[in-house]
Image: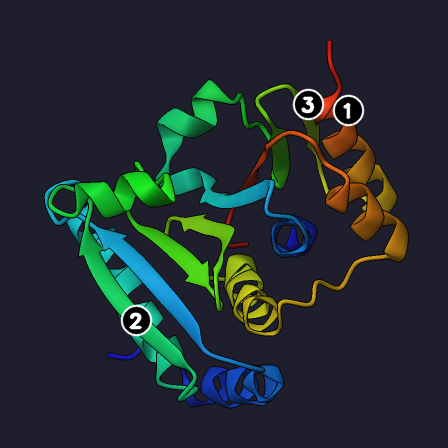
Amino acid sequence: MRLAQHMSVASERVRSTVIEANEFPELSRAYQVMGVPKVVINDRVQFEGAVPEPDFLGAVLQAVETP
Amino acid sequence: MPILNPRDQAAVRKEFERIAGPVKLVVFSQSLAAPELCQQNEQLVREVAELSDQITVEILNLAIDRERAEAYGIDQVPAIVVEGNRDWGIRFYGVPLGYEFSNLIDSIIVASTGEPVLSEETLASLRALASDVDIKVFSTPT
């Protein structure tokens, strides 16, 4: 999922962490990772599978919206 | 025994022709926590760094270099921070092999250029962000 890293470079606000799910079973359990890639943004918005850039951006914006 | 075979090395060298400036790979290890994975991760990072004279490596210990770990927000090992002329916020947890390996190589290149390959619309939206965004990408090597 290269979009996440490119977004990090695009904005000081964005941090991206790629996590090898098999090597971090506790984290994977905590975030209920069933399939990969799984993306979790601000522990609020999540989706599975590769998505086009506009959809990824939409998820980022949704994650920072005031509830 | 090397992790990268000669064919991998040649492919990465070709990719690294796009590196535009210095990159530092800051590696966090902790031999007590995950000895084999940390050792494998260090070896992989060193092998990658050998393929470009623009890449430097710093190996830190999560238990000893606590202030650095905290500053980077690292609390797991093995971990890699990919820095260009500044810390862009790119982190890897676990040994980036397989699919994640190409992700690491791509991250090194974009960290060196500081020029993300994203649409104008995405760039404008990201520039306008008013709060912090933490993206976790769970992946596997295959």
Residue A58, how many percent across, how many down? 82, 33
Q: Amino acid at mark 2?
A: Val
Q: Marks 3 and 1: in contact by CB < 8 Å?
A: yes
Please, what secondary structure does the residue beneath circle 3 have? Answer: strand
Q: Residue B54 got which mark?
A: none
Q: Position of residue B22 (x, y in %)?
A: 46, 78
Residue in the foreground of this view, choosing between A3 and B122: B122
Task: Judge whether B15 appears above or below B142 on screen.
Answer: below
Of all chains, the one bearing label 3 is A
Amino acid on which disc 3 is placed: Val
Can you say which quadrant of the picture contains the C terminus of chain B?
bottom right
Question: Horizontal placement of A17 versus B135: left or right?
Answer: left
Picture quarter containing residue B130? top right
Chain for disc number 2: B
Label 1 vs 3, first from the N-terminus: 3
Which chain hosts label 1?
A
What residue sits right under mark 1 in the picture?
Answer: A62
The residue under label 3 is A45
Mark 3 neighbour density, 10 Å: few (under 14) some (14–19) many (20 or more): some
Residue drawn at point x = 45 percent, y = 19 percent: A30
CA–CA distance in space, label 2 to label 1: 36 Å
Do circles 2 and 1 both sit on a common chain? no
Identify the residue at image location x=36%, y=25%: A26
- Which quadrant would residue B116 be assigned to in this image? bottom right
Q: Position of residue A39 (x, y in %)?
A: 63, 35
At label 2, counting other C-alpha atoms closer than 10 Å, the crowd grade (few under 14, some 14-19, many 20 or more) is: some
Q: Is residue B122 left or right of residue B54?
A: right
Residue B13 lies, with reference to residue B25, above or below; the image says below
Q: Secondary structure at mark 2?
A: strand
